[in-house]
Amino acid sequence: MGNKEEIDFPEAMTYNMDSLMSQYMSKTYLSVDNDCQMKNENVTYDKEVYIDRLHRMPTIMEMPYNEVVQSCIDRYTERMRRSVSYFLGAANFYMPIFEEALDLYQLPLELKYLPVIESALNPTAVSRVGATGLWQFMLPTGKAYGLNVNSLVDERRDPVKASYAAARYLRDLYGIFGDWNLVIAAYNCGPENINKAIRRSGGEKDYWKIYPYLPRETRGYVPAFIAANYVMNYYCEHNICPMKSELPMKTDTVIVDRNVNFSQIADVCGLDIAMIRALNPAYRRDIVPGATAPSPIRLPINDISLFIDNQDSIYATESGTQKRMEVIVEEVASKKGSASDRKSKRSKNSKNAKYHSIRSGDNLGAIAKKYGTTVNKLKKLNGLKNNNIRAGQSLRVR
């Protein structure tokens, strides 16, 4: 367990910061705080200091120290320093939402840092296996917990609805396992894999005792969660400056019963469409489909009355939005049919597919040599434009 090479870091800990910052929310509403006086240099401490700090955090959940936890702390405070700055800036907007949902179900509030390791606090994040949103719900689990997903709406990306769904899911997992470390491990790999690890360990129900029997990424999941709690509390001690957030701290929703396009709201009310998108990430195509079912639009609280006062003008262009919706629905149906044809063709070629799980230090040349192929073939097979790969990805080699 002490060997740092035994784990794969959670996928969100492998994101490239430039890629993260290219997301619309961070690009538009988070910026570097030029007033920060701290040197951009990490400070390391003796083991006893980390142990003491973890012990002093006001948490219900166990926050032990070991070498795996230390490796995750080091990753956050060194390689991921800029990402942590982003987390701290975005946290001003998201953490109150998370805390309200967790508090309603009487869950430990330290679980609010779970989306840090799940999605890097990106509401539109999609993992390599299709998990989506801040809380990274897979489609079946999201629907099981009441999240609506269709061509126009994906409520897994809704910060509020997904947070309450995640709280219910975590509550249910605690009802199964009765141990918070096992709960968040199950959140990562599913309760079936935790039960399998318990059986293989001879019936042990302690996370650190079933640790060797867990999937590789899940071995790094609880340590990463502990490290996220640490760095979000002790960032100053490591000279990390939070980014400045310009997202409105107070927002509210208006229910609409007609189809409304973001551009209509932005044009009539004089609002920034990028801000509307940032506050309403669940709407996949800039359309609130209120005609299908009454739907909420979230706006800065000071602009709610502006929207209400101008509803007639906003709805006056409804026919144009409806026409666009019809075109979009037709496009989605057409693409779905084409995708089905392509999938059928691919399935014939994919029966004998073989994949390589990328580890830290791997490169395309070494992987190609291992599997008796070439770098160009690997790039073509995986749709790669360059030689950049990252730990945690699956690379098709055949």
Image (cartoon, helix red, strand yellow):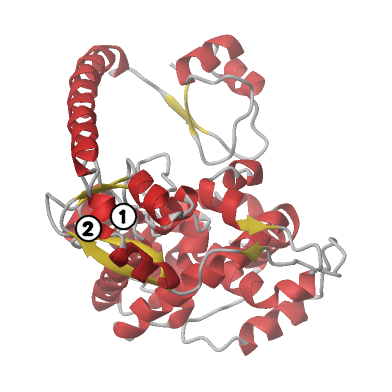
| Residue at the far left in the pictured view | 292
Q: In this view of the protein, can residue 205 be seen by the observer?
A: yes
Q: Amino acid at mark 1?
A: Arg
Which of the 4 image quarters holds residue 146? bottom left
Q: Which residue is mark 2?
A: 147
Task: In this rendered view, identify the residue nearer to me: 213 or 261.
Answer: 261
Q: Is residue 239 left or right of residue 232?
A: right
Q: Which residue is mark 1?
A: 156
Q: Position of residue 350 (x, y in %)?
A: 31, 17
Q: Is residue 106 left or right of residue 237?
A: left
Q: Quadrant of the N terminus?
A: bottom right
Mark 1 is surrounded, within 10 Å at the Cα level, by few (under 14), some (14 to 19) or many (20 or more) other residues, namely many
Mark 2 is surrounded, within 10 Å at the Cα level, by few (under 14), some (14 to 19) or many (20 or more) other residues, namely many
Q: Residue at x 47, y 68 (%)?
A: 94
Q: Residue at x 35, y 54 (%)?
A: 157
Labels 1 and 2: the sequence-earlier one: 2
Q: Position of residue 339 (x, y in %)?
A: 24, 21
